[in-house]
Image (cartoon, rainbow, N blue to C red):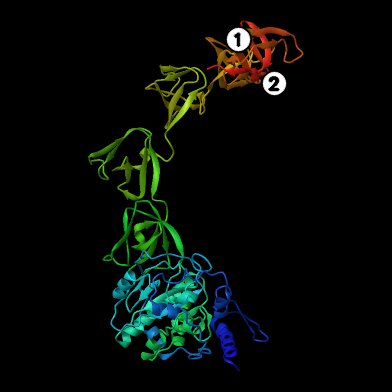
Amino acid sequence: MNNKKIVTLIATNLLLCSLTPIAVNAQTGEQTYQTQENNIIDANEILNRTGIDESIYTPSDQNSADKIEAQSMPTQEQHDVYTSARSVSNINQYIIGKNYGNPVIEQQIKNFTRFNYADGYGKPRGVVIHETANDNSTITGEINYMTQNWENAFVHTFIDRDRIIQIHPTENAVWGAGAKANPYFVQFELVREKTQENFYKSVNNDAYYAAYILKQYGITPVNAHNTGIGTVWSHDAVSRFLGGTTHTDPVGYFNKWGYNFNQFFELIQQKYNELTVPVYKVYYAKSTISLRSMPNWNSSIVTSIPEGASVSIDLNSKTSEQFYKVTYQGKTGWMKLDYFSSTSVLEDNYAKSTINLRKSATWDSEIAVAIPTGEKVSLNNTTLTNGFYKITFNNQIGWMKKEYFSSTPVLETYYAKDIVNLRKNAVWDSPISITIPAGERITLNNSTLTNGFYQITYNNTTGWMKKDYFADQPTIELLYAKNEIYTRESPSWDSPTSFSIPEGGQVSLNNTTPVNGFYKITYGNSTAWMKKDYFSNKAVLVDYTASSTVNLRKDASWDSTVVKIVPNNATVVVNITSASNDFYKINYDGQVGWMKLSYFQISK
C-alpha cells in the first residue's frame, strides 16, 4: 500500500474519532456523525485550488534564503501516525488535574498590513501551531521583534506560561507558514519555557487558545498533523503536505519534554469540549466606567464607557474575581457586572414647571441649576437616593424627585380653532385672561390638567382653557379664489348669498369647521361659508409678458373669434388655475380672452 493510500485511510479514521455521535441505531449499534464539511480542509484542496493570488500571502520583504524556502515542495512524509486516542496521555492528565485555568486573551493589535483569507474576511479554515525556536526569548521580546520585522513574517498571537497576546485581527490572514497555508489558517507562536512545569502551563494555554479560535469560528477540531486533512495543523505538517516552508515546529520542542503533537491535539479536544458558547446580553452603564484590559483593578484602561451607553456582556465569561468580558464600540475589556443595568439607565424627561435642581439628594441642599418649564432633561434611573434622582440638564448635574417631571413632552404647540377666551383660573366662572384670535398658535402644558382645563400661554400671557378648543395642526389656511365666488351665509347651497370674493382674492379658511363639505371662510373682515375646491393654495393671478403680438380668443379654441390683440411685450394677467384644452384665461387691458401659455413668459 503506498503512502497516499495510507494517508487517506488514516484521515478517514481521524474524522470519525474527532466527531461526536448524535444518534445510535438501537438494533445495529451504528452511529451517525454530524460533520462541518465546509470547515475540514485537506492538502489536495489547497494545492489544487486555482484563482488564489499567492503574492498576497507572501511576505513583502524576503531574503534569498526565504525565497528558496518558499519554493520548497511537500514531501507527504508520515510522522507519528495517529489512529485513535483510547485514553488521555499521562502528561495531559497531569495538566488537566492541575486546573491551571485559562488566561485572558490580551489585545495588542499592531498596524500590520491586512488581507482576507481565501474564503473571505473572518473565514479561516483552521489553525497552525508554531513555536518560537528560541530558548532565550520572552513573549514581549518576541512581539517586539515581530513588530520591527513584520514585513518578513507575522502571526496572530503569542502564548507563554502566563499570557496570551493577540497582535493581529484573526478575521484577517497572516504571513506565518508559506503562501500555501497563509490563506486558510489562524496562526500562533508558543514561546519556549525553561522548566517542565512552565512547559505544561504554556501548552495548556496554547491548547485553550486553539480551542477558543475553533469554537469562535464554528470549526470542528480534526488533527491534520499525520494526514494533511483536518483543521489543526502543525507547522511541520504544513511543510510535509503543502510546502512553501521547511519548518518542523513544534515537533522537536514537544519531543524535548516527552510530548508530541497528537497528545497536544487530545488536549485541544478536551479544551474545546469544555468551552461554553458565549452568551451575550445588552447592558447599560450606570455611570461613566473605565473598562479594564484584564479582569483586575490594576490593569490598564481599554476605553471609557459613557453613562447610559449600551454594551454587550458575555454572561459566560465571569472570572473568579467576578469580572465579565464587556464589549463597547468594538473594544473589549473587563468589568464587574454590578456597574451595569439590564434596563436602560438614562431616560428623557420634561420639566412640568420651573424646577430648581439640588446639588445633593436633599431639599436642604443648595440649588444647582434652574430648569424652565418643558425643558428636556436626562434622568438616571439607577441613582435613586432619598427619593431623589440624578438629573442632567445642559451638561449640569443636580438632584430632584421624579414626580416633578413628565416622561412625555410637556409643552405642545396648538392652534385656536376659533376665537377663544382664556380664563384666569381652571373654571368657566373665572374672569377672562386674554382673547386668542382664530388660528393663532399657543403653547399648552400637558402636565397641568385641572377640572378638564389646561394651562395655556399666548403672547407671554397665561390662562386656562379646555384642550378641545384647539387643534394640533394649523387651523387657518390662506387660499385664493379660482374665479369670482359667491359665499353662503350658512353651510348649504340653499343658503342666501353672503358676499362675493373676486377672482384671485385671498381668503382665510378654517380647517376645523367642515360642515356638509363647506368651510368657514373669512375675506377682509367678513365671514361666510364655501367649499374648499373653489380655492387654490397658490396665487391664482400671475403677471406674464407677451413674447410677440398675440390674438386672444373668445373661448379656449383656435376656432374661436379674436376678442383682443395683445402687443409684443405687453403685460397680461393669467389665471393659472383655468387651463382648458391647454388654453388659459388671460386678462389684458380689462378684456378677458383665452390663449396658450407658450406665447407668454412670466414677468420678471
Q: Amino acid at mark 2?
A: Asp
Residue 79 in the image: above or below residue 284:
below
Quick check: can you spot residue 370? Answer: yes
Residue 259 in the image: above or below residue 22:
below
- Quadrant of residue 97 within the rendered picture: bottom left
The one nearer the camera, 446 or 387, is 446
Residue at left offset 27%, top offset 45%: 361
Residue occupied by mark 1: 502
Badge count:
2
Quick check: can you spot residue 257? Answer: no
- Quadrant of residue 426 within the rendered picture: top left
Residue occupied by mark 2: 582
Residue furthest out toward the top: 590
Under circle 1, the secondary element is: loop
Residue at left offset 45%, top offset 84%: 236
Instruction: Indicate the position of residue 215 as horizontal and vertical percent values.
Output: 48, 72
Q: Is residue 576 left or right of residue 246?
A: right
Residue at left offset 43%, top offset 36%: 409
Cα separation, mark 2 vs mark 1, equals: 24 Å
Instruction: Indicate the position of residue 251 as horizontal and vertical percent values.
Output: 41, 87
Q: Dot 2: few (<14), some (14–19), or many (≥20) neighbours within 10 Å?
A: few
Instruction: Indicate the position of residue 99 as horizontal and vertical percent values.
Output: 37, 81
- Please tell me which of labels 2 and 1 falls first in the chain: 1
Q: Amino acid at mark 1?
A: Pro
